[in-house]
Image (tube, rainbow, N blue to C red):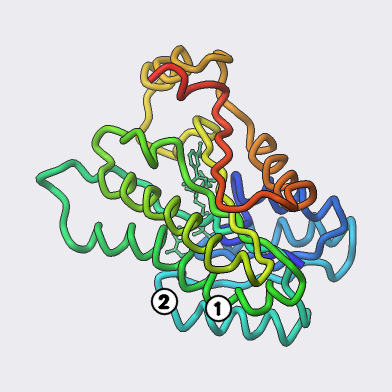
Amino acid sequence: MALITGGVKRIGAAIARQLHAQGINLVLHYHHSETAAHALQAELHNQRPNSVLLFQADLRQIPKLTSMVRQIMEHYKRLDIVVNNASAFYPTPLGKVDEKDWEDLLDTNLKAPFFLSQAVAPHLSENHGCIINLVDIHADRPMKSHPVYNITKAGLVMLTKTLARELGPKKVRVNAIAPGAILWPDKDMDEVSKQRIVSNIALKCHGDPKDIAKAVLFLVRDGGYITGQVITVDGGRTLNQ
Ligand SMILES: NC(=O)c1ccc[n+]([C@@H]2O[C@H](COP(=O)([O-])OP(=O)(O)OC[C@H]3O[C@@H](n4cnc5c(N)ncnc54)[C@H](OP(=O)(O)O)[C@@H]3O)[C@@H](O)[C@H]2O)c1
């Protein structure tokens, strides 16, 4: 039984399809994407009825997280995998950052994964489960004009390592995946910028959400002795910077 935050679109949906295809039942969390959530649930129920539960929440509201975990346990009675995938992403040029941006990005990308991990840890421990955090190659190589986003992902890397240490004795593994250029943002990116990024990637192409989903599956299924690690999936982009 796996919980994926932001799990109904883009990379989250690819992770959902990959785990579901392995026979794993899902709780797919979403925030605004209700139509996409019901469409993905219907698609997966066509393959295996009653295998996907949907949960709507703004992850910045911590009591909603604990309520989500309580409802999952009431429904499924177990939890094995948590993927902290949901994320906010937009530029915050220095000099123009206000507290609202700071709180939005920090709360979504760092505070929510921390409190969700804290809430699920005792349940994961019962099944020797795992947590996987979606970080970013920009966690340690700052993306220009995105200081607050960069800081959130750097924090999420430390969250991964520190919780791996805390939860190791409880047989819960905590790892991260750092994608490079997989899917372009929905808006705000011109063709020239995309070409510039691709020319800096060793494999000379952007990745596919399935590349991230396969890395998640590796950590879930084959990574039994891996914890506290960040797996970079970037086509060699970080070799060039
Ligand atoms: N795309 C890439 O190439 C790339 C590169 C590096 C790292 N990553 C990381 O990989 C992960 C997936 O990337 P992505 O591009 O697929 O993500 P995304 O589309 O930017 O965001 C995923 C989901 O996060 C949810 N979300 C945002 N704010 C939320 C909030 N306050 N409460 C609850 N949910 C919220 C949204 O749900 P709703 O749609 O339901 O509102 C959204 O669909 C992210 O952690 C991202 O940082 C991606």
**Badge 2 is on which residue?**
61
Are there few (<14), some (14-19), or many (20+) residues within 10 Å of tag 2? few
- Say if 171 sits above or below 201 in the image: below
Q: Residue at x 35, y 53 (%)?
A: 152
Q: Residue at x 54, y 43 (%)?
A: 230
Which quarter shows the C terminus? top left
Q: Earlier in the sequence, mark 2 or mark 1?
A: 2
Which numbered tag is attached to residue 12?
A: none
Q: Tell me the kind of residue under disc 2.
A: Gln
Cβ of mark 1 under 8 Å from ligand 1: the answer is: no
Query: Which one is in front, 135 or 29?
Result: 135
Q: Residue at x 55, y 60 (%)?
A: 164
Q: Is residue 199 left or right of residue 145?
A: right
Q: Is residue 154 left or right of residue 48?
A: left
Outermost residue, left side: 95
**Badge 1 is on which residue?**
119
Residues under labels 2 and 1: Cα distance? 14 Å
Image coordinates for residue 200, horizontal then vertical, percent: 44, 15
Image coordinates for residue 47, horizontal then vertical, percent: 89, 56
Which quarter shows the N terminus? bottom right
Q: Nearer the viewer, mark 2 or mark 1?
A: 1
Q: Quadrant of residue 204?
A: top right
Image coordinates for residue 83, horizontal then vertical, percent: 61, 58
Q: Is residue 200 left or right of residue 23?
A: left
Query: Which one is in front, 127 or 235?
Result: 127
Q: Residue at x 74, y 77 (%)?
A: 126
For label 1, the SS is helix
For label 2, the SS is loop
Cβ of mark 2 under 8 Å from ligand 1: the answer is: no
Query: Which one is in front, 222 or 212?
Result: 222
